[in-house]
Image (spheres, helix red, strand yellow):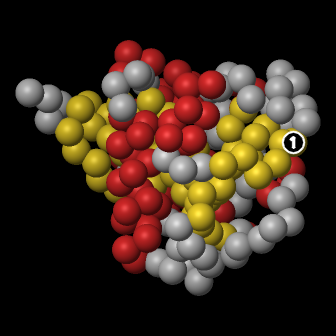
């Protein structure tokens, strides 16, 4: 039986987080090391690491935003400063990134991370909705979100460097 642990990320996790990031995303849409370190330092409780048998194999990071119906591409700029957007008095949880090492995909771990982060944030903050951005090309990720009650809000044409559309999805709680 495998041992599963979900815990808050710490600065000592950065090498494994970067390995997961490079395994999960094309180099043109990867977040950089300093962004992840800022997220850990600024909102550690919103950044979780999944360990299977004491091996970090996945992560999820988030921010809390003020709710807005005005969704634009600038809301989702890569490598943005968390300190400029995040507010613990906001009501919308933004899933800024989620990654799973390739050999661990398809086993429900992404769903596990999403569920655990949502539970923790809803218990502690006045969250009434969750928002995220996913590439139109990432059908497996979209299926996870749809199964979890997320609905497409809008599309951002050519958002990703490969020209694929970004799909903004939101779940009202």
Measured from the top left, where is residue 171 in percent x and y? Answer: 60, 57
Q: Residue furthest bottom?
A: 89
Q: Which residue is mark 1?
A: 156
Measured from the top left, where is residue 58 in percent x and y? Answer: 40, 35
**6 above or below 86?**
above
**18 above or below 148?**
above
Image quadrant of residue 44? Answer: bottom left
Residue at the (37%, 65%) spot, across then down: 120
Can residue 86 be seen here? no
Image quadrant of residue 89? Answer: bottom right
Secondary structure category for the residue under label 1: strand
Residue 28 vs residue 141, the one in the foreground: 141
The reply, left or right, for residue 137 in relation to residue 40 is right
Q: Residue furthest top?
A: 103
Quadrant where the image shows the N terminus: top left
Residue 44 vs residue 173, the one in the foreground: 173
**35 above or below 87?**
above
Measured from the top left, where is residue 21 in percent x and y? Answer: 54, 31
Residue at the (20%, 39%) spot, across then down: 4
Q: Residue furthest right?
A: 157
Total number of numbered discs in the rendering: 1
Residue 112 vs residue 103, the one in the foreground: 112
The reply, left or right, for residue 22 in relation to residue 77 is left
Residue at the (88%, 25%) spot, across then down: 163
């Amino acid at each position: 039986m495998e041992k599963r642990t979900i815990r808050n990320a710490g600065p000592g996790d950065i090498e494994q987080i970067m390995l997961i990031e490079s395994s999960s995303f094309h180099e043109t849409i990867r977040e950089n090391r300093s962004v992840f370190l800022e997220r850990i330092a600024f909102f550690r409780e919103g950044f979780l690491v999944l360990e299977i048998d004491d091996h970090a194999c996945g992560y999820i990071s988030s921010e809390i935003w003020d709710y807005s119906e005005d969704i634009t591409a600038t809301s989702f700029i890569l490598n943005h400063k968390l300190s400029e957007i995040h507010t613990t008095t906001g009501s919308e949880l933004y899933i800024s990134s989620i990654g799973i090492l390739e050999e661990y995909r398809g086993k429900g771990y992404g769903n596990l991370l999403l569920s655990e982060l949502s539970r923790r944030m809803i218990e502690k903050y006045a969250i009434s909705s969750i928002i995220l951005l996913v590439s139109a090309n990432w059908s497996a990720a979209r299926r996870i979100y749809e199964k979890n009650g997320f609905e497409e809000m809008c599309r951002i044409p050519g958002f990703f460097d490969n020209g694929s559309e970004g799909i903004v999805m939101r779940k009202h709680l």
